[in-house]
């Protein structure tokens, strides 16, 4: 019997040109390069230019993923954009991406799971493919988080950056005896009781404004490592693998200390953990695909590798996805 699987055909990342270093930030807000590097592990972040929108970042990353896959926009029949910072309240950023890529068939929609958005989007696209609703999905995490920040609040403005990453998942029927590959298992969770530990104080139905990010940082930190490791174990259990089988761990890039804590709790050697938080900061839904694009471009992740994606964010939402490259 054939098995339908969503295999990864290509990945691409895009970062806006403007780089904002810790030293530059320290000129406008009461912080220091030393504090940010010590507590979070961030050295710099990228900031979208005026007039550069989330859908523009998404399209730039999508084009790189299409090039990487050797495909054209016409080959795509599903677009899922994970974002918390869409261009407009509606329509979905995904439909703007569809238009900008010149795609006039298939379907496109956004997913809102904040920093876990990309992992949610991978699991969603995988389900659409396995259920016969799509053949080739463009899965994107794209954010202009800089536009949700209160640039006078040192507790949040130093943490985030802008960027986008894209992955193409393709329906493949594995032949009898052919080894498993593609998305092997996903584990998704949420718990709305924690909504106000990390949220934006505005929205169409409450204030009619966009609002700014508010975070109880130490509270989020306290939950992060446990929740991350829970879903990682859950995805491993579903697919019959163990931590020792993993070639690469590509975590959400929010805080170097959280990544190190999760890696240590899982018993993963640090050299198997992909880190980009130092250069990208927390790009929310874009962080995992951006980290993936870096580790693929520098040749670390290779065909056949077993790769664990993981993220946790506002809601709280959290999730993991295990992929055989
Ligand atoms: O992507 C979604 C998930 N988000 C996260 O994973 C974020 C999770 N939380 C964190 O990463 C950390 O809690 C933070 C990096 C946000 C904060 O680090 P912390 O070690 O928990 O610091 P804190 O909030 O307990 O603050 C310690 C001190 C405070 O000063 P006092 O009260 O001890 O005098 C803060 O006012 O650090 C101060 N502080 C700063 N100092 C310099 C807070 N932000 C800054 C800053 N620069 N930017």
Image (tube, rainbow, N blue to C red):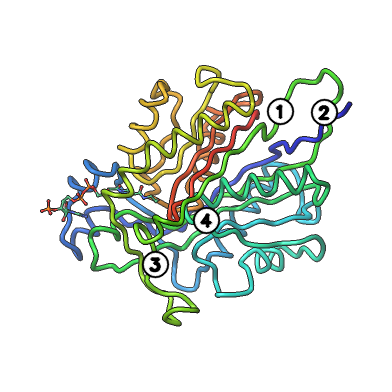
* Residue named by callout 2: 174
Residue 26 shown left or right of residue 45 in the figure: left
Label disc, if present, on residue 113 of the rendered structure: 4
Dot placed on the residue nearer the N-terminal end, 4 or 2: 4
> Do the residues bearing badges 2 and 3 touch, measured as CB atoms within 8 Å?
no
Mark 3 → mark 1, Cα distance in angstroms: 38 Å
Q: Residues within 10 Å of mark 3 (few under 14, many from 20)?
A: some
Q: Residue at x 71, y 68 (%)?
A: 99
Label disc, if present, on residue 200 of the rendered structure: 3
Coordinates of residue 269 in the picture (x, y in percent): 40, 20
> Do the residues bearing badges 4 and 1 touch, measured as CB atoms within 8 Å?
no
Asked whether 76 or 232 is in front, the reply is 232
Dot placed on the residue nearer the N-terminal end, 4 or 3: 4
* Mark 4 C-beta closer than 8 Å to ligand 1: no
Q: Residue at x 44, y 64 (%)?
A: 48
* Residue named by callout 1: 181
Dot placed on the residue nearer the N-terminal end, 3 or 1: 1
């Amino acid at each position: 019997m054939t098995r339908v699987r969503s295999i990864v055909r290509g990945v691409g990342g895009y970062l806006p040109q403007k780089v904002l270093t810790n030293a530059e930030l320290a000129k406008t807000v009461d912080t220091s390069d030393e504090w940010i590097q010590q507590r979070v592990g961030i050295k710099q972040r990228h900031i979208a230019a005026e007039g550069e929108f989330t859908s523009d970042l998404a399209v730039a990353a999508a084009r790189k993923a299409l090039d990487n896959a050797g495909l054209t926009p016409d080959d795509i029949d599903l677009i899922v954009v994970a974002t918390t910072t869409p261009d407009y309240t509606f329509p979905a950023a995904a439909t703007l991406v569809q238009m900008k890529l010149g795609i006039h068939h298939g379907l496109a929609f956004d997913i809102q799971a904040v920093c876990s958005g990309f992992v949610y989007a991978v699991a969603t696209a995988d389900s659409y493919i396995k259920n016969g609703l799509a053949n080739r999905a463009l899965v994107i995490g794209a954010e202009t988080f800089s536009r949700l920040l209160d640039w006078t609040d040192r507790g949040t403005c130093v943490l985030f950056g802008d960027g986008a990453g894209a992955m193409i998942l393709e329906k493949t029927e594995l032949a009898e005896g052919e080894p498993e590959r593609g998305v092997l298992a996903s584990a998704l969770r949420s718990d709305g009781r924690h909504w106000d530990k990390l949220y934006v104080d505005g929205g169409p139905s409450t204030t009619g404004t966009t609002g700014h990010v508010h975070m109880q940082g130490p509270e989020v930190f306290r939950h992060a490592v446990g929740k991350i490791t829970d879903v990682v174990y859950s995805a491993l259990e579903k697919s019959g693998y163990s931590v020792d089988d993993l070639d690469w761990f590509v975590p959400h890039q929010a805080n170097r200390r959280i990544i190190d804590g999760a890696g240590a709790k899982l018993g993963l050697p640090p050299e198997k953990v992909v880190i980009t938080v130092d250069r990208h900061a927390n790009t929310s839904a874009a962080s995992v695909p951006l980290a993936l694009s870096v580790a693929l471009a520098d040749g670390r992740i290779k065909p056949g590798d077993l790769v664990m994606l993981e993220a946790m964010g506002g809601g709280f939402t959290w999730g993991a996805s295990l992929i055989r490259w």
